[in-house]
Image (spheres, helix red, strand yellow):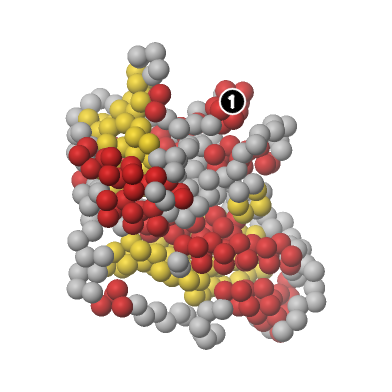
Amino acid sequence: MTLREERVTLAHGGGGKAMRELIESVFLSVFAPPGMEDQARLTEAALQEPGARLAFTTDSFVVTPVEFPGGDIGKLAVCGTVNDLAVGGARPLWLSASFIIEEGCEIALLRRLVASMAAEAAAAGVRIVTGDTKVVNRGACDQVYITTSGIGVIAPGRDLDARRIRPGDVALVNGVLGDHGATILAARGDMMLSADLQSDCQSLGTLMEAVLRAAPDTRCARDATRGGLASTLNELAEAAGVSVELDETALPLRPEVKGMCEILGLDPLYLANEGTLVTFVPADQAEAALAAMRATKAGQGACIIGRATEAGAVPVTLRTAFGGSRIVDMLVGEQLPRIC
């Protein structure tokens, strides 16, 4: 079917011919799911393997602006859901995608977002197999919101869990910190800041598979999204009953991110990331895990940033460049709203 309108109207959510034209022209023509039913019917040889488990996750994305340097809300939705599966040790396989679209949204924008989602899904080795579309009145949402759910398969024998972290384990990240949060802040233009930054938005499934092959006793992994590295480490430390000590001189931060944070009084450890994970591995497997990360596109900037210690009075501390120590607490409130 040919879609003639340039903007979404309420008729496109009405369940009739206009809605079918929108779905077929914008979504089905790109995602090409098998058949056209109200559910996806999934088969995978990995599901038949004794001991294999399903992993299931869901997330909603409301970032503003919906297009930003290094990505857009469509790419973000795919990466975010793929990464939530991957850090749990699952191989991501299938995604659903549901769209809430504001009346008046440009059809051209939707096409760009859908193309971005399809490209990232292909790169991550997942299929978008089902979804939904709703149109709301002008002003009821900001152009478009996307909810994605994902299913993956956890191979027998894998058991990534924060409670497995032990004192002496090493903490690694796969790249720079805070790029996504800083990029979104600059892209909004509210602060009249100019920075040559791009979001780190990327899928991490290939990287996680490489780490698990190289370091089979990997304790756990977590993508450091909202709340940044600081909040993620606090969650992991509390779950494991350990403390974590970071080395300030080892933290990978771009000068542009540090400069922006200094101007605005922000802490880069709390800025959101969308393609950065932190993982804990036994000390004797840290170098192997580091090498495996660096051999992937998403992990070329991987480094060791700290280690787990016996539980102390504070879950996470930072050893400063001057030899002192400061508390790295859980984020209170929200540094930046609408970042993912």
- The residue drawn where x is 35% and y is 14% is 324
The residue depicted at 29 percent of the width and 73 percent of the height is 46
Figure check: 138 above or below 20 = above
Which residue type does callout 1 highlight?
Gly
How far from the left and from the top, in percent, is residue 109? 71, 62
Query: Which residue is identified by label 1?
Result: 259
Measuring from the top left, give residue 59's x and y in whole percent. Answer: 47, 58
Q: Is residue 64 above or below residue 250?
A: below
Residue 235 appears in the rendering: no
- Vertically, is 131 above or below 215? below
- Residue 321 lies left or right of residue 128; in this view the side is left
Instruction: From the viewer's side, name the closer residue of 99 and 275.
Output: 275
| Residue 171 in which image quadrant | top left
- Which type of secondary structure does the marked residue at label 1 adopt? helix
Residue placed at 42% from the left, 37% from the top?
229
The reply to whether residue 245 is in sight is yes
* Picture residue at 44% right of the left edge, 40% below the top: 301
